[in-house]
Image (cartoon, grey):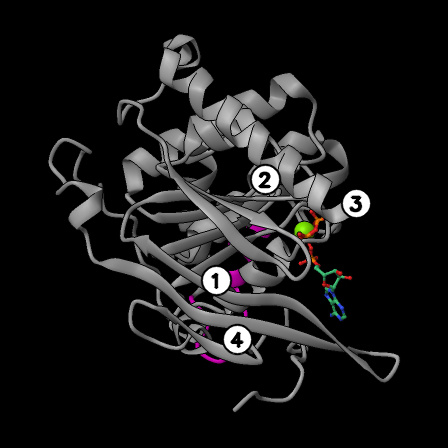
Amino acid sequence: MPRAPAREKTTRSQPSSEAVLSIAPAPTLAETAPLAVAPAHITARGVSVDFAHDGMVQRVLSGIDIDVPRGSFVSLIGPSGCGKSTLLKVMAGLLTPSEGDVTVAGLAPGEAAKRHMIGLVFQEATLLPWKTALENAAFLLTVGGRATPKDVALDKANEMLRLVKLEGAARKLPSQLSGGMRQRVAIARALALDPEVLLMDEPFGALDAITREEMSRGLLDIWERTGKTIVLVTHSIDEAVFLSRDVHVMATGPARIIETLPIELPAHRDEDTFNLPAFGEAEAHLRRLLIQGHAGERA
Ligand SMILES: Nc1ncnc2c1ncn2[C@@H]1O[C@H](COP(=O)(O)OP(=O)(O)OP(=O)(O)O)[C@@H](O)[C@H]1O
Ligand SMILES: [Mg+2]
């Protein structure tokens, strides 16, 4: 039985932290079990989202099924307006689907978010302009019912700024930082909560090509060191292939997943990865799918 059209929850902020959690060094990729046999960390089953609009109901997502293995890095790619952000919001517990179910570590996403298991990074860094980079990175730890003591939160934020290579900018205000630096502060802020799951919606969309590549490598480095489960929404085919273990390709009308492409590249990715035949093949395949998706949209 379909539920009522989806309504976005009013709070988009992440939950406050109840305790400072340190990011334990993750096992290296070689030490972990193959991702294919790892249990799913995020699952979506038959997820549909309807939005009510001018008295009409628009089906935005239709019958989405996804399994994201624990510790994996997956991307969602698809035409603008196809529902990528909507799906990410459902996974974050910010939006209740009209049909179907999503779980994060076996929990409803809202419950997982309450337990600080989910970190969110959006395209805009949304930093507090009057706070320094360090205070911004500590912010989510210091607010809420059972906030972390400020000095402990600042220590944790310092550690995260080092992780995103911004320790030298800790005392600067957002207006004194470049777009890439602001985005790294936003990533540090999400990581400070030590979430198991990092959901990122076009986090590098506003950056120039070179900064974007640097940020991609930095994110990969963080992922390899922390073993978090990462879901990335991106419009960049290169970025999706370079970073992901699986790429979920979405199409419009209403959005559904048309293909999940496993990226058959070595676990460790670096400069040489771009030159591998498998990289070019995956890129060409995704390009064809996206062209089909766009053609379907115009038809
Ligand atoms: N709160 C909302 N109320 C009504 N319609 C919405 C709402 N949020 C999104 N939509 C509609 O849902 C569809 C999918 O939007 P969504 O933002 O998920 O797309 P997207 O794939 O992230 O696009 P982009 O790549 O441009 O960011 C669009 O048609 C959009 O207008
Ligand atoms: Mg979007």
Q: What secondary structure is marked by label 1?
A: helix
The residue to which callout 1 is attached is: 141
Q: Position of residue 25 (x, y in %)?
A: 22, 41
Task: Determine the CA span between mark 4 and mark 3.
Answer: 47 Å
Q: Is residue 55 above or below residue 147?
A: below
Q: In the shown orientation, is residue 236 left or right of residue 217?
A: right
Label 3 packing within 10 angstroms: few (<14), some (14-19), many (20+): few
Task: Determine the CA span between mark 2 and mark 4.
Answer: 31 Å
In percent of the image, x 44 and y 72: which residue is there?
109
Is residue 166 shown to the viewer in this render? no
Residue 144, labelled with which disc? Answer: 4
Task: Determine the CA span between mark 3 and mark 1.
Answer: 46 Å
The outermost residue toward the bottom is 1
Query: Magenta span: helix, strand or loop, mainly?
Result: helix
Q: Nearer the viewer, mark 3 or mark 2?
A: 3
Q: Nearer the viewer, mark 4 or mark 3?
A: 3
Task: Determine the CA span between mark 1 and mark 4.
Answer: 8 Å
The residue to which callout 3 is attached is: 298
Task: Determine the CA span between mark 3 and mark 2.
Answer: 21 Å
Tag 2: amino acid: Thr
- The residue lying toward the viewer, choosing from 276 and 143, is 276
Q: Position of residue 88 (x, y in %)?
A: 55, 59
Q: Is residue 235 above or below residue 38?
A: above
Of the two numbered discs 1 and 2 on the same chain, state the one appearing first in sequence: 1
Q: Position of residue 200 (x, y in %)?
A: 53, 48
Is residue 241 shown to the viewer in this render? yes
The reply to whether callout 4 and callout 3 are in contact (CB within 8 Å) is no
The residue to which callout 2 is attached is: 234
The reply to whether callout 2 and callout 4 are in contact (CB within 8 Å) is no
The magenta stretch spans which residues? 134-148
